Image (cartoon, rainbow, N blue to C red):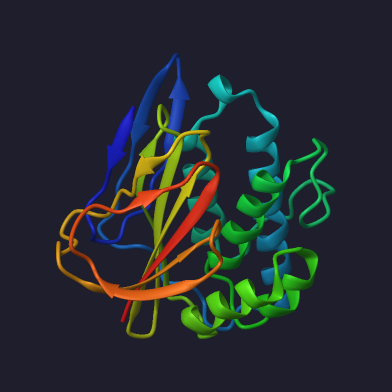
Amino acid sequence: MTRRYTKAGLLMLVLALGGISVIIVTDRPEKQNTGQSAVTNQIRALSISHLVCEFLSKQDDARSIDELASHLSEVFSSKTPQPSPEHKIGRCDKKLNEKEYSLLSTMFITLPLDEAYLELLKHFNLEAKSVSELVKALGNSVASSFDIYYTDDKKQLLGFSVEKDDKRIYVVVNFSYDMHDLPLPLGFMASTKIKLWKSDSGEVNEFVTQGPLSIDLLSTAVIIVD
């Protein structure tokens, strides 16, 4: 099932009861606490890592993008997130292939952790040049929002947005083994100047969009609009 959300901030809660999904939407996202402590940051990083590792450990047909999105929203809507079960950042019980590990790594980097998150990059094995280009483009200011705007269980696509100062950052994660069109939020202008980073290329490119964009299999795409 495909779900596309408006660009306005929202938080999503999916309750799976007898195969029925219930979506609860709020008008605006809860703003992130700019005074996040290093401890809170670490807990959130552990939670992200644990959630994505659990997701990747399941068979393809058992993976629920809606459920993953719901859990991620809960992590960032909570001022005091609960620690995950004993789990090391970036370490999954299931052995990940290179593409899957890259997914976990890039997803963690682009989620709205505070400045201290840079210290956590040491847990990941992405190439230094690729990481430095992305970090420079993202900036290290505190993110003020985290919104899910797109989920598609069939295509295994997750889209979320992060707001930092005057930047809006859109992140699309493709958990499937197929290439897809890159989903953008409703209201996104067809001709927009963007910076685009893709995990499969590791480079930041700046250009004006002229048509549909694509995302490669098992990869992350980051779109930055200043």
Q: Quadrant of residue 119?
A: bottom right
Front position in the image: 126 or 22 = 126
Residue at image location 51% in from the left, 85% down from the top: 141
If the image is split into quadrants, where does the N terminus sit? Answer: top left
Q: Quadrant of residue 131?
A: bottom right
* Residue furthest to the top: 18
If the image is split into quadrants, where does the C terminus sit? Answer: bottom left
Reply above or below: 143 against 155.
below
Q: Is residue 151 left or right of residue 82?
A: left
Front position in the image: 5 or 152 = 152
Reply above or below: 208 against 53.
below
Reply above or below: 43 against 101.
below
Front position in the image: 13 or 174 = 174
Q: Is residue 127 left or right of residue 179?
A: right
Residue 52 screen position, x and y as percent: 64, 45
Residue 215 screen position, x and y as percent: 41, 49
Residue at image location 63% in from the left, 36% down from the top: 55
Residue at image location 30% in from the left, 37% down from the top: 3
Front position in the image: 55 or 13 = 55
Q: Is residue 96 left or right of residue 210?
A: right
Q: How many marks?
A: 0
Residue 12 screen position, x and y as percent: 38, 46
Residue at image location 70% in from the left, 69% down from the top: 127
